Amino acid sequence: MRHWKRVVAVLAVAAVALLVEGWVARAQAAPTLFKGCTYTRTAGEHGQPPYSLAPTLGLVKVTLRTNRGDLVLTLDRANAPCAVHSFTHLALRRFFNQTPCPRHTRAILECGVGRPGYHFAAELTGHETYPRGTVALSNTPGRGNSSAFFITPADAPLSPTSTVLGRVTTGQPVLDRLTTSAPATLLEVLIG
């Protein structure tokens, strides 16, 4: 009878060990839900940086309401979680509302130029490309990313130094109008 109890005990321990091993393997294979980001305050500027934990899963829908019509963007958290987190933080604080897009050419439309009070490192793979409709952050040498972003109305042969946030999903004709010589203004930036 004792032999039978030992066999049952060994089988129970083995089953528990296999179960725990499976849980550990699944936990290691699961995607990380958050990334720790470092947002560094900029001396002499006021502004509250976002929380340091940025979600890494999902897409964010953004509507840019401009003086020439609306653009709808899809931002990808998996590609640049810290940058998307910062962009949504600024949009929810109405940082971009009623601001000009000071650089508008046939190659690039740059908006969001301002002083948010912080900067952070670029999220780059070194293989970034900027086809028509790409949304990316302007990278300031020595400081990294801040609030300025740009959209490419045509394929842009840029060096891979700017963090790609996402793409324009609706509004290419509006984007074409925004890159003409008349001033472009962000009236409102809506998340969701």
Image (cartoon, rainbow, N blue to C red):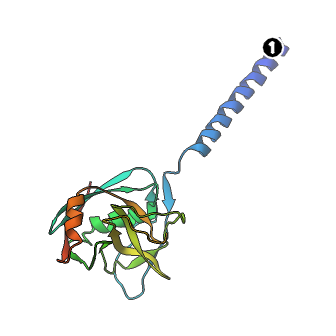
The location of residue 50, given as percent across then percent down, is: 39, 68
Position of the N terminus by quadrant: top right
Count of marks placed on residues:
1
Write the residue at 50% across / 59% down. 35
The location of residue 115, given as percent across then percent down, is: 33, 81
Nearest the viewer among 58 and 167 is 167
Nearest the viewer among 3 and 63 is 63
Residue 173 visible at all:
yes
Position of the C terminus by quadrant: bottom left
Task: Determine whether the residue tagged by mark 1 lies in a helix, strand or loop.
Answer: helix
The location of residue 65, given as percent across then percent down, is: 19, 64
Write the residue at 61% across / 45% down. 28
Q: Quadrant of residue 148?
A: bottom left
Write the residue at 17% across / 77% down. 182
Residue 98 visible at all:
no
Q: Residue furthest top?
A: 1
The location of residue 37, given as percent across then percent down, is: 49, 66
Write the residue at 80% across / 18% down. 7
Q: Residue furthest right?
A: 3
Up the image or down, 105 lies above or below 21; here it is: below
Question: Which residue is tagged 1?
Answer: 4
Up the image or down, 101 lies above or below 128; here it is: below
Dot 1, how many residues are within 10 Å of its Cα: few (below 14), some (14-19), or many (20+)?
A: few
Q: Amino acid at mark 1?
A: Trp
Up the image or down, 128 lies above or below 138; here it is: above
